[in-house]
Image (cartoon, rainbow, N blue to C red):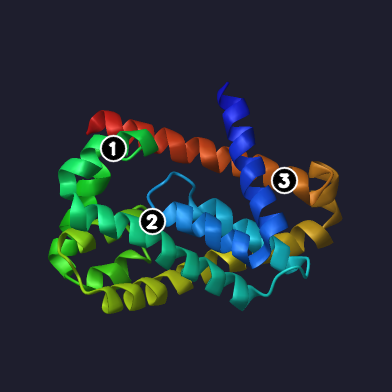
Amino acid sequence: MVERILGILATFTIGVISSGGYLGIALLMAIESACIPLPSEIIMPFAGYLVSTGRFDLYLAATAGAIGCNLGSIVAYEIGKRGGRPLALRWGKYVLIGPGEIDAADRFFERWGSMAVLIGRLLPVIRSFIAFPAGVARMKLVPFHVYTFIGSWPWCFGLAWVGMVLGDKWNSDPRVKAAFHSADALIGVVLVALVAFYIWHRVRGMKRG
């Protein structure tokens, strides 16, 4: 059952980006930024792979990802603004959000204030939840979106760049092709492994919380 679910998630990610283009990247990154467990560490490297094939432009892919982050962050921001922590704790378990992730984002925002949105977007885990305490604090929307975009763009660019570099190697190194038969097979294996680790980490964090 677990393998089937992971396979569906990996296929979904690949399918949305392959068919939706830049819009697909934005959509998936919006889902990730809405605190739904679909990590950017899977989305953007695959977009980068498509950069290596000539399908996408690296800078446009990163920009589409950052725009998606802004769109998805509106959801987490509004939850924080309207319902606060009780609402997040009540419904967060359904998307694998535990008290630990919320606490970490709260502490980070308390320490850095509004700049936490900019800095937090460059940090794993924190970046997915930083919009929530910004909403609780009722941070002004214009700086919130500006900081979200500026902080998200380098993150999206870096992950896409990694995917692009690896994609070039997958396409050019015959030893890699011989080992995995095709780039798609390697991508599938990596995606499934990353999704499995991500979900396992989230579930463990919820139990600890």
Helix, strand, or loop for circle 2?
loop
Rendered location of residue 158, percent (x, y):
53, 68
Q: Which residue in the protein does label 2 denote?
A: 124
Helix, strand, or loop for circle 1?
helix
Q: Which residue in the protein does label 3 denote?
A: 186
Q: Which residue in the protein does label 1 denote?
A: 91
Please tell me whether residue 99 is drawn above or below residue 53 in the rendered image: above
Where the N terminus falls, by quadrant?
Answer: top right
Q: Please, which residue is most extreme toward the front here?
A: 82
Check if mark 3's residue and mark 1's residue have beta carbons within 8 Å: no
Rendered location of residue 49, percent (x, y):
69, 61
Q: Amino acid at mark 2?
A: Pro
Is 93 left, or right, of 10 in this rendering? left
Rendered location of residue 141, percent (x, y):
27, 73
Where the C terminus falls, by quadrant?
Answer: top left
Mark 2 nearby-residue class (10 Å; few <14, some 14–19, many ≥20): few
